[in-house]
Image (tube, grey):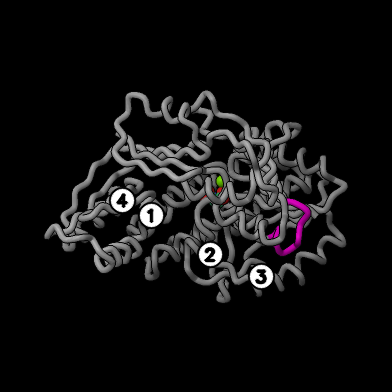
């Protein structure tokens, strides 16, 4: 039993959806649980719908949703013939659910509405693909994952109820494999005990796939991506970016911590706990070996580069030149929590604390304003935060030539530099 996950980019055109069908057909002698996310940039488009709705711009919301509907119906036309009517009916049911909601006035939290609307992205994509599979005689079972994955009601960042979900997987998913080789379902979404839809955080489909892999004790999880493998840097920005054939779970957690956009950070734990290997493979050329992520410790890794742009460095300085001690630091961290902002790097000096953040304008403004009651606050924008794991002097030199380093932190394995 294996778990496959296909992300938005793997199904963003008719050809690519067909390609997913081809990949799955090539594994016809295996039991597969297939997790798929929303088509292309659908989640972003649905976010716009919710924003308009919540700001009271009902007509805009409906209009924006109309575009999402059309783009899906358009793709559907080319995927199905015999099943076209049934497929369209199923999509229309999802549309109606959203449109009903958009007709009302918002009375609950933004995050609640977000989840109710955004979840249709994956429901629509998987329903379409399911009808396409039926058309292609790829025998499978489509499941609404909201009947399986139970979460709390922390909308937009819901936490899994592992016990309930495990029981559901045992009772409802496992028996399906007696009659079907392929079970097809959605990533990223779940539901509360009151049947409200929830989401697991942006890019959460990887995590959904890992949850299934864990609960089904799968042989492996394969995440199909539009890259050849995990790379040591963004190949668009670094011509020396190299393919990394093997990585340990711990290394991937470290990379994600520093901001590498390899895999959703929550994905690793459920796999690591059950020693389930994760393969990152190219859906464009499945014959390429990709990257294997496992418990196996990795040696001789190349320098791994994580480059974060749009950084802001804030200095919090004690007003009376006294030492910055536990209490004010604690207050500051409480403030970070309240604003939901996390420093990417921080450093103490005797009378100040320096923190580097992603420059999310609204949050930064609020932070600066509130922190000013406790500290003298100064900030510098338009910086870059460069992290190099397994650094060597050559790499540091190449990447910092001509730059001004404003702040630097080095450990045996990792160097981080905030640069102007
Ligand atoms: N569709 C969701 C997103 O774009 C979840 C995912 O793709 O993993 O964030
Ligand atoms: Mg994605």
Which disc number belongs to residue 96?
none
> Does label 2 or label 3 sit earlier along the sequence?
3
Q: Residue at x 60, y 59 (%)?
A: 93
Q: Secondary structure at mark 3?
A: helix
Instruction: Identify residue for label 4.
Output: 355
Of mark 2 and mark 4, the one earlier in the sequence is 2
- Of the image marks 1 and 4, the number of the one nearer the N terminus: 1
Q: Where 62 sits versus 283, above or below?
A: below
Q: Which residue: 77% across, 43% down?
A: 24
Dot 4: element: strand
The quadrant the N terminus occupies is: bottom right
Mark 2 and mark 3: Cα distance apart in space: 14 Å
**Along the polypeptide, which appears first: circle 1 or circle 3?**
1
Give the labeled residue for mark 1: 51
Q: Looking at the image, is mark 2 or mark 1 nearer the viewer? A: 2
Find out whether the residues at labels 2 and 4 contact each other: C-beta distance under 8 Å: no
Image quadrant assignment for residue 227: top right
Q: Which residues are magenta?
A: 212-220
Local crowd size for mark 3, using a 10 Å CA cut-off: few (<14), some (14–19), many (≥20): many
Magenta stretch holds residue 215: yes
Q: Position of residue 79 (x, y in %)?
A: 70, 40
Q: Are marks 3 and 4 in contact (CB under 8 Å)?
A: no
Is residue 126 visible to us here? yes
Q: Is mark 3 within 8 Å of ligand 1?
A: no
What's the CA distance linking mark 2 and mark 1? 17 Å
Q: Earlier in the sequence, mark 3 or mark 4?
A: 3
- Mark 4 packing: few (<14 Cα in 10 Å), some, or many (20+)? some
Above or below, comparing residue 49 to residue 145 in the picture: above
Q: Secondary structure at mark 1?
A: helix
């Amino acid at each position: 039993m294996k778990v496959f996950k296909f992300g938005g980019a793997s199904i963003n055109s008719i050809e690519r959806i067909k390609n997913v069908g081809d990949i799955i057909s090539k594994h016809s002698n295996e039991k597969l649980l297939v997790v798929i996310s929303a088509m292309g940039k659908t989640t972003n488009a649905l976010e716009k719908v919710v924003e308009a709705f919540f700001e009271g711009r009902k007509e805009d919301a409906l209009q924006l949703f109309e575009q999402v509907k059309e783009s899906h119906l358009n793709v559907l036309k080319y995927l199905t013939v015999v099943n076209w009517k049934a497929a369209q009916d199923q999509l229309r049911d999802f549309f109606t659910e959203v449109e009903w909601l958009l007709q009302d006035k918002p009375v609950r939290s933004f995050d609640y509405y977000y989840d109710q609307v955004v979840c249709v992205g994956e429901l629509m994509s998987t329903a379409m693909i399911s009808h396409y599979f039926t058309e292609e005689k790829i025998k499978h079972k489509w499941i609404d994952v909201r009947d399986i994955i139970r979460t709390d009601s922390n909308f937009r960042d819901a936490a899994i109820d592992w016990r309930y979900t495990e029981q559901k997987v045992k009772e409802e998913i496992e028996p399906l494999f007696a009659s079907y080789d392929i079970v097809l379902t959605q990533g990223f979404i779940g539901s509360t005990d009151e049947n409200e839809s929830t989401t697991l955080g942006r890019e959460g489909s990887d995590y959904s796939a890992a949850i299934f892999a864990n609960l089904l004790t799968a042989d492996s999880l394969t995440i199909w991506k539009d890259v050849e493998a995990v790379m040591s840097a963004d190949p668009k920005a670094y011509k020396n970016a190299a393919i990394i054939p093997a990585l340990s779970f711990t290394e991937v957690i470290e990379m994600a911590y520093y901001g590498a956009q390899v895999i959703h950070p929550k994905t690793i734990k459920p796999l690591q706990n059950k020693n389930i290997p994760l393969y990152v493979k190219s859906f464009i050329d499945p014959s390429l070996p990709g990257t294997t992520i496992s418990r196996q410790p990795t040696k001789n890794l190349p320098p791994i580069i994580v480059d974060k742009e749009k950084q802001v460095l804030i200095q919090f300085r004690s007003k009376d030149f006294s030492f910055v001690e536990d209490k004010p630091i604690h207050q500051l961290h409480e403030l970070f929590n309240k604003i939901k902002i996390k420093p990417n790097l921080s450093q103490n000096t005797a009378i100040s604390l320096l923190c580097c953040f992603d420059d999310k304008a609204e949050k930064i403004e609020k932070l600066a304003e509130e922190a000013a009651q406790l500290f003298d606050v100064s900030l510098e924008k338009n910086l870059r935060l460069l992290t190099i794991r397994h650094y060597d002097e050559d790499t540091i030199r190449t990447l910092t030539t001509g730059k001004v380093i404003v702040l630097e932190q080095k450990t045996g394995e990792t160097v981080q530099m905030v640069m102007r």
